[in-house]
Amino acid sequence: MSLEAVCYRRGSLQILNQLLLPQQSLYEDIGGVREGWEAIRAMKVRGAPAIAIVGCLSLAVELHSKGNAEWSVSKLENFVLDSLNYLVSARPTAVNMSRAAQELGDFVCQEAKREGATAESLQESVISWAEAMLEKDLKDNRRIGEHGARHLLQQIGQDKVVVLTHCNTGSLATAGYGTALGIIRSLHAMGHLEHVYCTETRPYNQGARLTAYELVYERIPATLIADSMASVTMKEKKVSAVFVGADRVVANGDTANKVGTYQLAIAAKHHGIPFYVAAPRTSCDLSLQHGGQIAIEERPGQELTDINGARVAAPGIGVWNPAFDVTPHNLITGGIVTEFGVFAPAELQAALMQADSQI
């Protein structure tokens, strides 16, 4: 059974504080929007899909706790819109939260104008919308896992595969199962996974702390490597493919993901290893044409200079700490894996537009 990073029932939201893993598994209550924002900003919860889910569910929990006696329809509508704008500001690079804010914002405006709308009906609609988002993400992740696993096996014609992954893209980053790590789970369940190599993912160590934790938890054969060992691992360990997640995929297929992804894609192309990006539709932003338009979040320098509160870097040294980098579409040689299938970067925009038209 996969780990649960988000535990929700109506009126109650708890998150697994990922800052404490793997030493301690502690679930913390999120009582409303401000606590949701703080948990996202502090990276107690992280991963593009999980950020959006926790953000929207924190709003649902606050609406439930406030009741509807004090609201008018217009006041409730404004509260929802203001809350969504606030949540988007917590971490700007991942598109999922801003996309969810846009969609839920449009939805609440439409519902507010519906004839006979009341504060009670509007409140129920918003809460139900957020709950449906949680369920859909889990279903989409399972589809991504199946599509990615089958595509790789068909492309390389091997019975057993060795894969390399970066950062954390599993149950801890989503509603459950995961995206890139979901594909690895599917390969393992199908009996076709020989071994996984996961990077430590400096400077925040999501691979060492979180992906390794999930792999050990589910008894998937795996080895942790330092980020600087990726190229030699590809050369010496017969890596079949690289699978990574995405915080934003734009129209031409350029992809923003955890810093270090770009160099993995370069190394994979040099070694002739297929490089895959796994991303649900919610992580795809067709409003941007290329990766140069993606806003890249920069994190505090202390994340790089300190480890567990202890200074390891020379005092006075300057620090540049971008949280993400952009992988050009021409390096994504395996494909972009979505819940709708696997597409070459050049095919992605048309495929998603067709899928959107059928929803």
Image (cartoon, grey):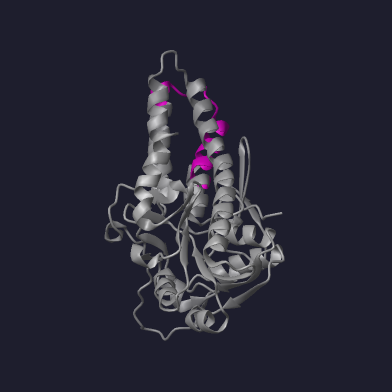
Point out the stretch of residues depicted in magenta: 54-75
Tell me if residue 345 comes above or below residue 200 in the rendering.
above
Residue 234 position, x and y percent, is 51, 79
Residue 194 position, x and y percent, is 66, 71
Tell me if residue 126 comes above or below residue 339 in the rendering.
above
Whether residue 332 is in magenta: the answer is no
In the shown orientation, is residue 55 left or right of residue 29? Answer: left
Res. 264 image quadrant: bottom left
Q: Quadrant of the C terminus?
A: top left
Res. 8 image quadrant: top right
Residue 247 in view in this figure: yes
Residue 274 position, x and y percent, is 47, 68
Q: How many marks?
A: 0
Residue 193 position, x and y percent, is 65, 67
Q: Residue at x 43, y 21 (%)?
A: 72
Q: Residue at x 55, y 27 (%)?
A: 67
Residue 328 in view in this figure: no
Q: Quadrant of the N terminus?
A: bottom right
Q: Residue at x 50, y 38 (%)?
A: 59
| Nearest the eye: 182 or 111 | 182
Question: Please, which residue is most extreme toward the bottom here?
Answer: 314
In the shown orientation, is residue 251 left or right of residue 17? Answer: left
Whether residue 70 is in magenta: the answer is yes
Tell me if residue 333 comes above or below residue 35 in the rendering.
below
Magenta stretch, overall SS: helix
| Nearest the eye: 42 or 134 | 134
| Nearest the eye: 8 or 146 | 146
